[in-house]
Amino acid sequence: MKSGKKDGGVKEQLESYISKQKGKWIVLLEIPEEKYFEINVNTLKTLIGRGFSGLHISLNRPYQNLIELLKEQHIDVGKLSFIDGASSQADLKEKETEKCIYISKELKIDELIRAIYKSIPKIKNKNKFLFMDSITTLALYQPLSETLRFAEFLKRVLQNDEIEGVVVNVAKDLAQKSFIKDIILKVDKVIEIDGGK
């Protein structure tokens, strides 16, 4: 596992890394909390701009809010499917749609895995990615063993040729915590982001 430089924005660093890959990849982005949304937007724009379509697992923003914000940022949401774990946290009652699966507020790993397996076949592009806006949130709701099991699951999904790449965010101020260090061992690349471009 290699760590990226702190200079440069997510677009440059992610582009540089992906363009050099001949196989599957898992990237962990260490990002400042105040730049989460800006970096998420730039991550999605970078991946979609490279011809990918993907599955966005949102644990920070409810789907209805997120979809409007992404459209405002000129992101082609037609290239995205969603798993929403944020709406249940806010006690919003939403119905599953063709584009979004809602999961319970407990953020159970088995439920999340089922939602991923159900969502991936709906992505009609051979170049697929999975983007998770906050492994930190998952780790706050689940024991370390469950979070690590989820990280292992992501590696299996890659090995089974179901997706090309995975991008997972972690809050920079939590990146040095022991549970995150255990997750870092499961990724191919850590990119540290200071800015939001």
Image (cartoon, helix red, strand yellow):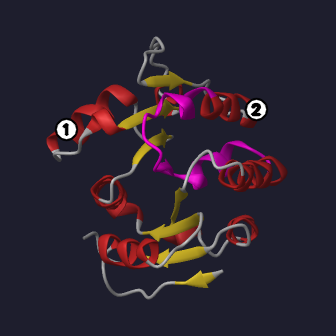
The magenta stretch spans residue 137: yes
Q: How many marks?
A: 2
Q: Quadrant of the N terminus?
A: bottom right
* Disc sitting over residue 110 in the figure: 2
- Figure check: 130 above or below 114: below
**Residue nearest the observer in this picture, 178 or 147:** 147
Q: In percent of the image, x 58 and y 65: which residue is there?
A: 25
Query: Residue 138 lies in magenta, yes or no?
Result: yes
Relative image position of residue 33 (x, y in whole percent): 41, 62
Residue drawn at x 41%, y 74% as measured from the top left:
19
Residue 193 seen in this snapshot:
no
Q: Which mark is residue 121?
A: none
55 displayed left or right of 70: right
| Image-based side of 143 in relation to 11, left or right | right
Q: Amino acid at mark 2?
A: Asp
Residue 89 in the image: state x and y as whole percent.
Answer: 53, 29
- Identify the element where label 2 is drawn: helix
Tag 1: Cα neighbours inside 10 Å, few (<14), some, or many (≥20)?
Answer: few
The quarter in which the C terminus is drawn is: bottom left
Amino acid at dot 1: Lys
Q: Earlier in the sequence, mark 1 or mark 2?
A: 1
From which residue to which does the magenta span run? 118-143
Residue where numbered disc 1 is placed? 71
Q: Position of residue 122 (x, y in %)?
A: 49, 28
